[in-house]
Image (tube, rainbow, N blue to C red):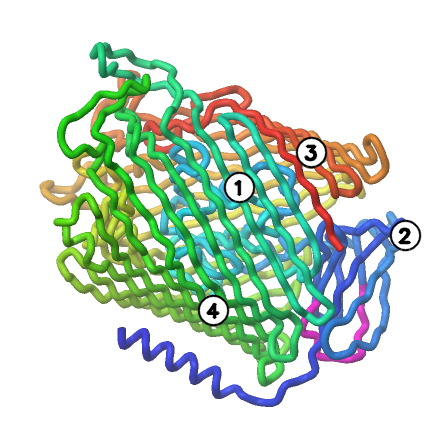
Amino acid sequence: MKNIKYQSVFFLLLIACTVQAQQFTASLKGYVKTTAQQGIAASTIRIGNIYSSTDETGYYEIKNISQKNVTITASAVGYRNTTKTIVLKAGENTFDFELVSDQKEIDQVEVYGRTKAQEVNRQAFNVTAVDATKLYNTTLNISSALDQVAGVRVRESGGVGSNFNLMLNGFNGSQVRYFIDGIPMENFGSAFQINNIPINIAERIEVYKGVVPVWLGSDALGGAVNIVTGDRFKSYVDASYSFGSFNTHRTVINAAHTTKGGFFFQLNAFQNYSDNNYKVTVDVADLNTQQYKEGVKVKRFHDTYHNESLIANIGVVNKPYADKLLFGIVLGKSYKEIQTGARMETPFGGWHRRGTTVMPTVKYKKSDLFVKGLDLTLNGNINVGTEQNIDTVYARFDWYGNRKYVPGKGGESSYSMYKYKNNLAVANAILNYKLSENHSLSITDVFNSFKRMGNDEVNPQNASLERAKLSQKNVLTFGYQYDVRDRYSVNAFVKNYHQHNVNGANEIVKNLSKWGYGTALAYYFTPSFQLKGSYELTVRMPTPDELFGDVENYEGNFALKPENSNNFNLGINYDFALNAANRFSLMANAFYRNADNFIYQRLNNNQTKYISDNRDGVRSIGGDMDLHYSHSNWFTAGLNMTYQSVVNTQKYEPDYTGISPLYKKTMPNIPYLFGNLNAAVTLYDFGGKDNKLTFGGSLQYVHRFWLYWPLLGGTDEESAKRQIPMQMALDGNVVYSIANGRYNIAFEGKNLTDNRLVDNFSLQKPSRGFYLNLRYFFNK
């Protein structure tokens, strides 16, 4: 605790020592349009060394301009560059561009016309950015979009709202951290998880593999996912509704309004509902007749899920004292029926969970704070919502839905109505000082606090549930960057990790402290050909769920030790054109991870719950590749593949004499070869001017892999159940956009071949389904 206090005091003193006079600042926004007044997406706006890209409507915004007289250039592929000199006033300014078509400028794409997602991909870190705006007319959630990224595999235990486990270059679960606009998501509650947040919330999704940048300030072991909602401070409404198979309904409403005086209001609201009553193939024992049958196809009958969530922010933007000062509230409610445990042999018919999120938030950002080049970002929130585990049914169920009374107190797993608060709080501060055009220093401090307290009205004698379980974590990072645009980039950083844990059940206290460091380098042979490499000695502290359990299917292990890993990445980015119509984009990366005290997930001793444990060592080595092709503006295709070898390097096992037979053997229940193939055809002005019709499809492939250690049992055909078979899922969609994207209709088919899809042990995912999505978008 002292260590955390000293770090916080040091950080505040550093900010206080920088106090000096304010300087002239201005912002500039507007639209880049064609001569026909259509917005040009992905065009580039440049003022000196400051770059910005337009969104899908042609809108751009540049903030923190320190000069009154500026020369601004607008450029886009297929249009003539336009340069203007204007005089800015302090505060907000507006200027629109009109570009004239000129196909001779097509070669400018080598330098100009990059989207924000493309700019992110050019960092020295091993990162892939997904342009979420291209997926707004789908029913995808964040996790579904991530499942299409090279190196990423999202494994789910069922349908809408089910538990998920994201794997990134061989590491998974809590080894990968999640953020929204750089704010850790560890305290968002069950109503806000990446598999129930709709894609429309995001502007882009950034996936950092292995080495995580300083400004995220994370203790991630294997990488991080940052959901960027975007700072498009303007007025818009984006609303969609979809419905389809298994009585699935989704609604999304995003809206924002900014006045000329800088008053800002933003609302994001969404809901998901599904009966999840798809068919599964299981072995069934009839409770009434005791008759046993193998491979029976039945419907899930106790798997309803729904959540309702709202994010509201109100405040001011582009003020002399703040680029952004927002006060907000995050509200959420979730209900989840639990159909099975960690395996599907026994179904449940009454066990369920409820959760709420009540989280006030504050966000502050100011560039050129006190001195030119000093930028400060502050964020804080606390979730005081509740979670409740309800298991009171006095019965047993079979897969036919039969119910049999069981004498006694009841409970299908553990008789309980345990209601608790996790009281999760997060505060982070980012201080960046630009010493010169190429040099900058940064400090990031992230503090997390977790305190679980609760009671069980049906087990009042269990006093251990009422004793607080406490975990406090602080990550302090110092970083340096030297960057020359389109030539080379150097990043170096050092991190301090500290965690204070208290197990309320027996009042055991643990304090953990570690150091880490790393670097990321990039060199540009040409502006479109980049070589980059990165290294980090990273540390991850155990999460509260790993230490204390999740009161559902996860058993706690307070004896867990922090895990650490040496992470190496080497990659290339290359964009090239065969001619004006045919373009390619290639991203390829090789990686090496060598982890100690590796925290992995296994079944507990009675095979009913998951539990985390440490292994002395795990090594992951492999590579991934992402290739995209486009022909003119009407056909696109993409292919990505990932290969990874995750090997156990623990030489000796407890209670085993000699070298372990599992030493240097492949870790079980981890896919090692998978990929995606996608293609889309777009017909412009179909049925009218500014309308377009798009046909798209995707094929996901996962090679078969061992469910258990292959050595612990036979590997012949009789042991087929010890493997998760090859998975292949085919999806298709048709999207019709009217009036330049204002009205949109989409029809989707998922798992069209109706394959039996399994990710985790024997837990089956949804069968074939069809969905209709209606979307309206208005921007002023």
Residue for badge 1? 141
Identity of the amino acid at label 1? Answer: Asn
Q: Is residue 475 above or below residue 605?
A: below
| Residue at left offset 20%, top offset 23% | 405
Within 10 Å of disc 1 (Cα), the crowding (few <14, some 14-19, many 20+) is many
Residue range corresponding to the magenta coloring: 62-73
Residue for badge 4? 492
| Residue at left offset 54%, top offset 41% | 145
What is the distance, in whole Å, between disc 4 and disc 2 at their CAs? 46 Å
Identify the secondary structure beneath mark 3.
strand
Precedes in sequence: disc 4 or disc 2: 2
In what quadrant of the picture does the N terminus appear? bottom left
**Magenta run includes residue 476:** no
Precedes in sequence: disc 4 or disc 1: 1
Which residue is at the front of the view, 306 or 123? 306
Identify the secondary structure beneath mark 4.
strand
Q: Is residue 157 above or below residue 726?
A: below
Relative image position of residue 470 (x, y in whole percent)? 25, 61
Within 10 Å of disc 2 (Cα), the crowding (few <14, some 14-19, many 20+) is few
